[in-house]
Image (cartoon, helix red, strand yellow):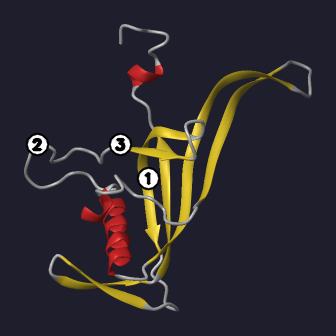
C-alpha cells in the first residue's frame, strides 16, 4: 500500500464515471371507494455510489500504484483477521472526497464491492512487489460500489445533542 501513502489514498488518474442515487420514500394509503392512493412522505436516502474509472500502467511506478489500488480495495471488502486487537472487526469506514465541498466532502462510506478487469487484448507490464514478479495490464477499468454510512450520533445530533 506504500504507493497510496503520498497521495493520501486512492486517486483515480482519469476522471471516473460516478452514479449516485437519491430516493424519496412515500407510504401510500388506500382510500375507500377511490381509484387513487394518498401518499405521505416517509424519508429520504442516499443510495449506493458507483465509481468506474480507467487506470493505466505505462511504467513500473504506475504499475505499482495500480497494484496498490487493487490490494486496497480487496482489503477494504474483508474483515480483519489473524492475531491482534482488530481481529474479527469489520472493514474500516473510508472517506470519499471529490469535486469540492458541495459534492463529496469526506463522505463516510463502506466499500460494498470492487472489480477490476484484467483484459486479454492489452499488454501487461511487470512490477516487483514483495520480492516477486507481478504482471498488471497497461490499461484496466476499476469499479467500486460504495454505501454512505453515518454514525447514529451524527445523524441525530441536531435532535438529541446529548448523544
The correct choice, above or below, for 100 with respect to 2 in the image is above
Q: Name the residue nearer the viewer: 51 or 44.
A: 51
Q: Name the residue nearer the viewer: 143 or 82.
A: 143
Q: Position of residue 137 (x, y in %)?
A: 43, 83
- In the image, is 97 to the left or to the right of 42? left
The correct choice, above or below, for 28 with respect to 131 in the image is above
For the point 44% across and 62% down, which residue is it?
Answer: 114
Assess whether mark 1 and mark 2 are in contact (beta carbons under 8 angstroms): no
The correct choice, above or below, for 62 with respect to 86 in the image is below
Disc 1/disc 3 C-alpha distance (Å): 11 Å
Mark positioned earlier in the residue sequence (2 or 1): 2
Q: Quadrant of the N terminus?
A: bottom left
Mark positioned earlier in the residue sequence (2 or 3): 2
Q: Which residue is mark 3?
A: 93
Could you say whether the residue bearing mark 3 is in a helix, strand or loop? loop
Q: Which mark is residue 85?
A: 2
Q: Is residue 154 visible?
A: yes
Mark positioned earlier in the residue sequence (1 or 3): 3
Q: Position of residue 55 (x, y in %)?
A: 48, 72
Assess whether mark 3 and mark 1 are in contact (beta carbons under 8 angstroms): no
Number of other residues with Cα within 10 Å of mark 1, as a class: few under 14, some 14 to 19, many 20 or more? some
For the point 36% across and 7% down, which residue is it?
Answer: 162
Q: Is residue 1 visible?
A: no
Could you say whether the residue bearing mark 1 is in a helix, strand or loop? strand
Q: Which residue is mark 1?
A: 112
Q: Name the residue nearer the viewer: 21 or 62.
A: 62
Number of other residues with Cα within 10 Å of mark 3, as a class: few under 14, some 14 to 19, many 20 or more? some
Number of other residues with Cα within 10 Å of mark 2, as a class: few under 14, some 14 to 19, many 20 or more? few
The correct choice, above or below, for 152 with respect to 4 in the image is above
For the point 28% across and 45% down, which residue is it?
Answer: 90
For the point 36% across and 60% down, which residue is it?
Answer: 73
Disc 2/disc 1 C-alpha distance (Å): 24 Å
Amino acid at each position: 500500500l506504500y504507493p497510496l501513502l503520498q497521495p493520501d489514498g486512492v486517486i483515480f488518474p482519469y476522471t471516473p464515471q460516478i452514479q449516485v442515487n437519491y430516493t424519496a420514500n412515500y407510504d401510500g394509503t388506500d382510500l375507500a371507494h377511490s381509484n387513487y392512493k394518498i401518499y405521505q412522505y416517509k424519508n429520504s436516502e442516499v443510495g449506493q455510489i458507483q465509481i468506474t474509472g480507467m487506470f493505466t500502467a505505462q511504467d513500473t511506478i504506475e504499475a505499482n500504484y495500480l497494484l496498490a489500488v487493487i490490494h486496497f480495495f480487496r482489503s477494504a471488502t474483508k474483515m480483519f483477521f489473524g492475531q491482534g486487537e482488530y481481529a474479527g472487526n469489520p472493514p474500516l469506514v473510508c472517506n470519499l472526497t471529490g469535486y469540492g465541498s458541495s459534492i463529496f466532502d469526506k463522505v463516510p462510506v463502506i466499500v460494498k464491492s470492487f472489480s477490476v478487469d484484467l483484459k486479454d487484448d492489452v499488454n501487461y507490464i511487470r512490477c516487483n512487489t514483495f520480492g516477486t514478479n507481478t504482471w498488471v495490464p497497461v490499461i484496466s477499468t476499476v469499479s467500486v460500489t460504495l454505501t454512505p454510512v453515518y454514525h447514529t450520533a451524527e445523524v441525530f445530533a441536531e435532535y438529541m445533542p446529548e448523544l
